[in-house]
Image: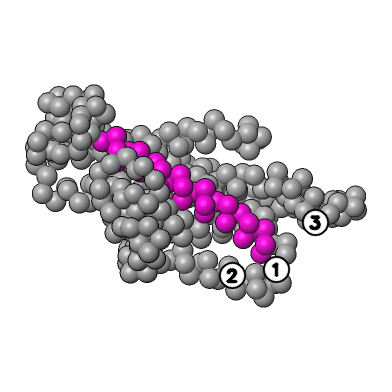
């Protein structure tokens, strides 16, 4: 009896240990996020005190040497390039995952998945270099100057496409075969099965892929630094050059001092705020049965 009782207690102890390990890890993640936010706020305080909060949204332009600190053009540009890339990559990723799971021959589907995994491992600077040498000249032929919002959207979409497509592909593959067999027995067409059964069943994966892609697109630096032109303005068209908040930080932090340096940390604070808003939107939009 004692030996049997010990055997029953051992899995319970392992489960309790794993629970505590997960709690500690979750606490560490929360602590790291708190420390990052605290650091950004402390570094931003000198700019808030000397420049004021409204100056970052109402000044004539971004020119710290002349005392102008308007971040709105760069914030708008960051959101435009991020949203455009997510919409494009999201549509392509979902369609490609549907093709791999329900239309493509197995050999072609496997080859495509391996290609996406390879693309996912390529650094952003490589995409940026290719875009600067190949894509920007092509856009320049269509509409000068080539370095533009459009170039940033296309390259960011290429960057996040593997993340979205592979996540959605995994979600589709995890849909229970019982659902598909039941749909077949009811006489549903392939597209009717996909739209009425597969998409609702895999909606959590679809939503997670979009959130992951949006998070990476908002924080990407090298691609937008290389192909977007780095002009501080609200773009009037997709062919207009732009500068994003991450690119602005990368360009100016090395020589910034005083209020200028503190204002760059305000840029980082805005990016963190955009990430938090993205998470809150995810919690608000996601159906409750995701978590049931």
Check whether the beta carbons of the residues at disc 3 and disc 2 lie within 8 A of each other: no
- Which is nearer the eye, 41 or 57? 57
Q: Secondary structure at mark 3?
A: helix
Q: Identify the image quadrant of the C terminus.
A: top right
For residue 112, which numbered disc appears in the image? 2
Tell me if residue 223 comes above or below residue 276 in the rendering. Answer: below
Question: Distance between the Cα atoms at labels 3 and 2?
Answer: 21 Å
**Would residue 169 be found to the left or right of residue 274 on screen?**
right
Question: Distance between the Cα atoms at labels 3 and 1?
Answer: 13 Å
- Which is nearer the eye, 184 or 26? 184
**Residue plotted at (33% across, 69% down):** 133
State the image quarter where residue 189 is shown.
Answer: bottom right
- Name the residue tied to disc 3: 190
- Name the residue tied to disc 1: 104
Tell me if residue 37 comes above or below residue 193 in the rendering. Answer: above
Q: Which residues are magenta?
A: 71-100
């Amino acid at each position: 009896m004692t030996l049997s009782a010990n055997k029953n207690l051992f899995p319970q102890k392992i489960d309790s240990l794993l629970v505590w390990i997960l709690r500690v890890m979750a606490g560490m993640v929360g602590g790291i996020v708190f420390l990052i936010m605290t650091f950004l706020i402390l570094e931003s305080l000198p700019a808030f005190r000397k420049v004021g909060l409204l100056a970052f949204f109402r000044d004539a332009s971004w020119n710290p040497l002349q005392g102008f600190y308007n971040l709105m053009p760069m914030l708008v540009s960051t959101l435009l390039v991020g949203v455009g890339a997510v919409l494009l990559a999201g549509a392509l990723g979902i369609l490609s995952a549907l093709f791999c799971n329900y239309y493509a021959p197995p050999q072609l589907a496997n080859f495509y998945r391996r290609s996406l995994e390879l693309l996912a491992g390529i650094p952003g600077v490589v995409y940026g270099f290719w875009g600067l040498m190949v894509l920007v000249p092509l856009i320049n032929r269509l509409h000068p100057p080539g370095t533009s919002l459009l170039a940033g959207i296309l390259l960011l979409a290429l960057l996040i496409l593997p993340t979205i497509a592979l996540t959605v592909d995994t979600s589709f593959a995890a849909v229970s075969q019982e659902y598909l067999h039941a749909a077949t027995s009811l006489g549903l067409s392939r597209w009717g099965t996909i739209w009425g059964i597969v998409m609702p069943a895999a909606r959590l994966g679809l939503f997670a892929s979009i959130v992951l892609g949006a998070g990476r697109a908002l924080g990407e630096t090298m691609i937008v630094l290389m192909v977007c032109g780095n002009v501080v303005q609200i773009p009037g068209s997709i062919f207009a050059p732009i500068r994003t908040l991450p690119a602005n930080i990368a360009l100016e932090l090395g020589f910034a001092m005083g209020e200028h340096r503190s204002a760059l940390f305000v840029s980082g604070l805005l990016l963190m705020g955009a990430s938090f808003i993205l998470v809150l939107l995810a919690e608000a939009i996601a159906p409750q049965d995701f978590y049931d």
